[in-house]
Image (cartoon, rainbow, N blue to C red):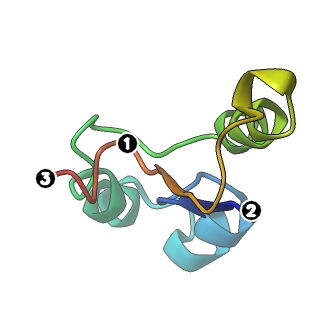
Amino acid sequence: MNAICPGVIHTEMIDRLTGKDPKAEKQFTDLEPVGRMGTPEEIAAAAVWLCSKAASFVTGHSMAVDGGFVAQ
């Protein structure tokens, strides 16, 4: 079994949390080494890859899809 461990992903939940206030959003983007929040499409792409034959030998992996947050 594999797992995807997402970072801060720009979704409606984040919009509700920040009220779409740029200063509040900046608090999240400042945490990300890549300087931005992730997108749902980026998480979906990781899931699709894990379900593909390209990942057929990947097992028991927790994949950080977090813009480098855990790598810093």
**Label 2 – label 3 distance at C-alpha:** 27 Å
Query: Camera-side residue: 13 or 46?
Result: 46
Mark sitting earlier along the chain (3/1): 1
Front: mark 2 or 1: 1
In the rendered image of this protein, does residue 50 appear above or below residue 63?
above
User: Residue at (66%, 74%) from the top-left corner?
Assistant: 16
Q: Secondary structure at mark 1?
A: loop
Q: Secondary structure at mark 3?
A: loop
Query: Camera-side residue: 4 or 58?
Result: 58
Residue count near mark 2 (Cα–Cα under 10 Å), binned few <14, some 14–19, many ≥20: few
User: Residue at (21%, 51%) from the top-left corner?
Assistant: 71
Residue annotated with mark 2: 12
Residue sitting farthest toward the front: 57
Mark sitting earlier along the chain (2/1): 2
In the rendered image of this protein, does residue 16 appear above or below residue 62?
below
- Judged left or right of residue 2, residue 22 is left
Query: Camera-side residue: 42 or 19?
Result: 42
Amino acid type, residue under disc 2 in the picture: Glu
Give the quadrant of residue 20. bottom right
In the rendered image of this protein, does residue 41 appear above or below residue 33?
above
Q: Position of residue 51 (x, y in %)?
A: 86, 39
Front: mark 2 or 3: 3
Quadrant where the N terminus is found in the figure: bottom right
Residue annotated with mark 3: 72
Residue count near mark 3 (Cα–Cα under 10 Å), binned few <14, some 14–19, many ≥20: few
Amino acid type, residue under disc 1 in the picture: Gly
Amino acid type, residue under disc 3 in the picture: Gln
Give the quadrant of residue 52. top right
Residue annotated with mark 1: 67
